[in-house]
Image (tube, rainbow, N blue to C red):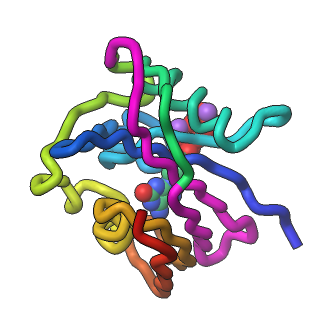
Amino acid sequence: GVPNKVLTLVLIREEYRILLGMKKRGFGVNRWNGFGGKVEAGETIAQGAKREVEEECGLTLTEFEEVGRIDFEFVGEPQILEVHIFRGDKYEGELQETEEMRPEWFALDAIPFHSMWPDDAYWFPIFLRGSKFKGYIKFEGHDKILDCSLEELETT
Ligand code: 6U4
Ligand code: NA
Ligand code: NA
């Protein structure tokens, strides 16, 4: 088969708020999303996550951890998107808007699920209670979920 496309997705969270970015171009445009992108040749997945956060919002992660993995299938596309999800706990630097993202903090009880990828409403609750998770989600187009299986692995 076709090899997976390996991607990162980083949610920087503090006790009462989470950092999202409004995607200004490309995949997921006009949606609030975590930061991330394709892992490049010669870097680890964690290095890719840290690099994308710097490129997309100017912050440098000093503490972060992989907490989830979701494989996405898009009907009609042979390649599975293998998304590695990280929680960012500490960072340095100044938040800045970039060509790709307009960052904004959201209170944990005011996450804009209606303007996010629809799968986020399923796994954010697991993420927010501090558990690790893995899953498989099948999309038709970018709005309709046909299949969703999520497994909560542990509470830390
Ligand atoms: P370019 O423009 O080539 O530099 P790059 O920044 O490498 O792109 P991008 O932005 O296309 O990659 O990566 C897609 C991002 O969208 C990754 O962070 C993963 C994330 N993503 C993909 N499907 C998602 C989904 N269903 N739900 C979600 N995030 C998703 O919350
Ligand atoms: Na990106
Ligand atoms: Na990129």
Q: Which of the 4 quarters of the picture holds residue 127?
A: bottom left
Quadrant of residue 52 in the image? top right
| Left or right position of 112 against 61 | left
**Image side of residue 3 versus residue 151, left or right:** right
Q: Nearer the viewer, residue 90 or 112?
A: 90
Q: Residue furthest front?
A: 156
Q: Residue at x 57, y 31 (%)?
A: 50
Residue 98 x/y as whole percent: 40, 19
Q: Position of residue 111 (x, y in %)?
A: 18, 54
- Ligand 3 is found in the corner quadrant, namely top right
Q: Residue 134 in magenta?
A: no
> Of all residues shown, which one is farthest toward the top?
94
> Does 107 appear above or below 72?
above
Q: Which residues are magenta?
A: 67-95
Residue at left 13%, top 46%?
107
The image quarter in which residue 119 lies: bottom left
Magenta stretch: dominant SS? strand
* Residue sitting at x 58%, y 41%: 37
Image position of 90 (left or right of 41): left
The relative height of residue 139 versus residue 114 in the rendered view (above or below) is: below
| Spot occupied by residue 126 in the image (x, y as percentages of width and height) | 35, 69
Along the line of sight, which residue is nearer the eye, 70 or 80? 70
**Of 113 and 50, the residue lying toward us:** 50
Q: In the displayed structure, does residue 67 sit left or right of residue 90?
A: right
